[in-house]
C-alpha cells in the first residue's frame, strides 16, 4: 500500500487556494441574483398572478426537472447556434446565469413555503389596518418568511458553491479544474482530489459558523 | 489570486469577441505530456507547439482550458478558434471542420494493468473484455470499427482511464501510442503496453469551416511547414516525448 504524497499535497494547497476567490465570486454573485429572482417568483406564485403564475410554474418545473450540467451545456454550447450573440457570453457569466436560474427554481419553492407558513391571521390583520398587498408582503410577511427560509437557503448556497465545480466544462478553470490539470501531470489523483475536497469542506464549515450567527440574529425578534 | 477575480470581473463587463490577430486555442490541460499543469503553469507539447506557431505567424496565442468534452462544442460555437489536444483527423470531423496539415503521426495503443500484457497482447485479445476510452475521442470509433466490436465492452470515460485500468475496473484502455508510453514511464501507475500500435493516426488542428477559419488554417499551415523544415517541430517532440513523432510513419 502506497502512502499519500503529503509533500505534493502541501505544494498543491496554495495553487488550489488561489482559485477560491473565483469560486466564491461565482457563488456569491449567483446567490445574490438568485435571492432576488426567487423572491419574485415566490411572490408571483403566492399571489397567483394570472398568466405569469403559469409561466413561473413552467420555469420552476424545467429548472428543477433537468440537471444543472445539462442546463449549462444547453445554454453555453447549444443556444449560441440559434442566437449568435450568445457566443460573446463567457464561461464565468454563463456559469453565473446557469447557477442563478437553476437555484432560483429551488429557492422560489422554499420561499413560497415560508411565506405560506406565516399564519393567515396576520394577512387578515394587516389588511384590516388598510395595508396594500405590497406593504403587507414587505413589512409583515417577508421578514418572517426570511427567518423560516434561512436554513434551507443556506443549504442551497452550499450546493451552489459546489456547483461551481461544473464551470470547468465551460472553460472556467476553478478549483476542480485546477486540480484535474495538476493531476494530469503528476498522476497523483488521490492527493489532488483530496486537497480539493478538504478545501471545499473547509469553506463550507466556515460558512456554517456564519450561518449560526445569522440565525441568532434573525431569531432575535422572536426569541423566547 | 487577485488577478483571477479581476479577470473574472473584467470578463463579465466586457464580453467582446477576440481581435483578429489572436488565435484562441482550446485544450483540456489534462493530457500528459501534451497539455497539463504543474504548479499552476500550463505546459506540454501542444503549448510549445502553439507558441512556436504564434512566433511564426505573428498571431497572439491565447490558451483556453476546459474539460475535453466541451472542446468541440466550444470550437463550433466560436468560443475558441482551434483545438490543440491531439485531435485525430477523421472523415466525420473533416466534413465539419477544416484541418491543418498533420503535426503528429501516431498509432492506437492498447494499455493494460502491468502483468496482464501476456494475456492481452493487442486489439484481437480485447474480445470479451472491458475497454476504457476517453469520451469524444476517436478511439471509441476505432474500436467500434473492429470486426468483433460487438464482443468488446467499450466504456467511455470523461477522464481518468489510466487510473481505472490500474485499479482493475476495466481490463484495458486505448489511447495513442506516444502518450501511452510516456504515461507508463512517468506515472506511478502499474501499467504496460499490450502489443504494437494497431492503426495509423494523423493528428492536426481543426478550424471552423468558414472564411476566417480557412484563412487562419492557411497561416498556420505555412508556419507548420517552416517549423518542420527548420527542425523546431522535431525539437519540441524530442523534448516532451523523447522521440520524433512529427513525421509520417511510412516515410
Image (cartoon, helix red, strand yellow):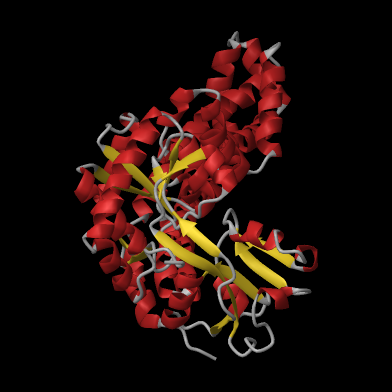
Count of numbered labels shown in the rendering: 0
* Residue B187, picture quadrant: bottom left
- Quadrant of the image containing the C terminus of chain A: top right
Task: Work out whether A117 lies above or below A184.
Answer: above
Could you say where residue A32 lies in the image, as x and y percent from the top left? 45, 35
Could you say where residue A118 lies in the image, as x and y percent from the top left? 67, 30
Residue A118 in sight = no
State the residue in front, B51 or A120. B51
Q: In this view, does B225 lie to the left or right of A164?
A: left
- Quadrant of the image containing the N terminus of chain A: bottom right
State the residue in front, B2 or A94. A94
Could you say where residue A141 lies in the image, as x and y percent from the top left? 60, 26
Q: Is residue B229 left or right of residue A105?
A: left
Task: Work out whether B214 lies above or below B119.
Answer: above
Please identify the residue farthest to the front as the structure is shown.
Answer: B251
Q: Is residue B102 left or right of residue B141?
A: left
Q: Is residue B34 left or right of residue A129?
A: left
Residue A129 in sight = yes
Could you say where residue B167 lies in the image, as x and y percent from the top left? 62, 79
State the residue in front, A68 or A131. A68
Q: Residue at x 38, y 35 (%)?
A: B214
State the residue in front, B134 or A205. B134
Task: Work out whether A49 lies above or below A46.
Answer: above
Q: Residue at x 67, y 63 (%)?
A: B143
Amino acid at each position: 500500500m502506497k502512502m499519500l504524497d503529503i509533500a505534493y499535497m502541501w505544494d498543491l494547497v496554495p495553487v488550489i487556494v488561489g482559485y477560491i476567490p473565483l469560486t466564491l465570486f461565482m457563488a456569491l454573485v449567483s446567490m445574490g441574483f438568485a435571492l432576488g429572482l426567487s423572491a419574485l417568483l415566490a411572490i408571483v406564485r403566492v399571489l397567483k398572478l394570472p398568466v405569469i403564475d403559469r409561466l413561473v410554474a413552467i420555469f420552476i418545473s424545467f429548472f428543477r426537472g433537468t440537471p444543472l450540467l445539462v442546463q449549462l451545456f444547453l445554454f453555453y454550447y447549444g443556444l449560441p447556434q440559434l442566437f449568435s450573440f450568445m457566443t460573446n457570453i463567457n464561461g464565468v457569466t454563463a456559469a453565473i446565469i446557469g447557477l442563478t436560474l437553476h437555484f432560483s427554481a429551488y429557492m422560489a419553492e422554499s420561499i413560497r413555503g415560508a411565506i405560506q407558513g406565516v399564519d393567515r391571521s396576520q394577512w387578515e390583520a394587516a389588511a384590516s389596518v388598510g395595508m396594500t398587498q405590497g406593504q403587507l408582503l414587505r413589512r409583515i410577511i417577508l421578514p418572517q418568511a426570511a427567518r423560516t427560509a434561512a436554513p434551507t437557503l443556506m443549504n442551497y448556497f452550499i450546493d451552489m458553491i459546489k456547483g461551481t465545480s461544473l464551470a470547468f466544462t465551460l472553460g472556467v478553470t476553478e478549483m476542480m479544474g485546477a486540480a484535474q490539470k495538476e493531476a494530469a501531470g503528476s498522476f497523483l489523483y488521490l492527493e489532488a482530489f483530496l486537497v480539493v475536497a478538504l478545501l471545499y469542506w473547509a469553506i463550507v464549515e466556515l460558512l456554517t459558523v456564519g450561518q449560526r450567527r445569522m440565525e441568532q440574529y434573525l431569531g432575535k425578534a422572536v426569541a423566547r | 489570486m487577485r488577478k483571477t477575480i479581476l479577470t473574472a470581473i473584467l470578463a463579465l463587463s466586457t464580453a467582446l469577441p477576440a481581435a483578429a490577430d489572436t488565435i484562441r486555442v482550446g485544450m483540456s490541460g489534462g493530457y500528459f505530456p501534451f497539455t497539463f499543469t504543474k504548479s499552476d503553469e500550463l505546459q506540454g507539447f501542444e503549448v510549445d507547439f502553439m507558441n512556436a506557431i504564434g512566433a511564426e505567424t505573428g498571431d497572439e496565442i491565447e490558451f483556453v482550458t476546459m474539460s475535453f468534452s466541451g472542446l468541440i462544442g466550444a470550437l463550433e460555437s466560436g468560443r475558441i478558434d482551434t483545438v490543440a489536444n491531439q485531435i485525430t483527423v477523421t472523415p466525420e470531423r473533416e466534413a465539419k471542420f477544416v484541418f491543418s496539415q498533420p503535426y503528429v503521426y501516431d498509432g492506437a495503443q492498447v494499455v493494460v494493468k502491468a502483468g496482464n500484457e501476456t494475456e492481452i497482447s493487442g486489439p484481437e485479445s480485447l474480445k470479451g473484455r472491458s475497454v476504457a476510452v476517453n469520451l469524444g475521442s476517436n478511439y471509441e470509433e476505432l474500436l467500434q470499427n473492429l470486426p468483433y466490436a460487438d464482443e468488446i465492452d467499450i466504456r467511455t470515460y470523461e477522464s481518468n482511464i489510466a487510473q481505472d485500468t490500474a485499479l482493475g475496473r476495466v481490463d484495458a484502455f486505448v489511447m495513442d501510442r506516444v502518450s501511452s508510453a510516456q504515461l507508463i514511464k512517468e506515472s506511478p501507475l502499474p501499467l504496460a503496453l499490450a502489443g504494437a500500435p494497431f492503426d495509423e493516426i494523423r493528428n492536426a488542428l481543426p478550424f471552423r469551416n468558414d472564411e476566417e477559419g480557412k484563412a487562419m488554417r492557411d497561416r498556420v499551415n505555412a508556419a507548420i511547414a517552416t517549423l518542420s523544415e527548420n527542425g523546431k517541430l522535431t525539437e519540441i517532440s524530442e523534448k516532451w516525448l523523447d522521440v520524433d513523432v512529427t513525421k509520417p510513419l511510412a516515410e
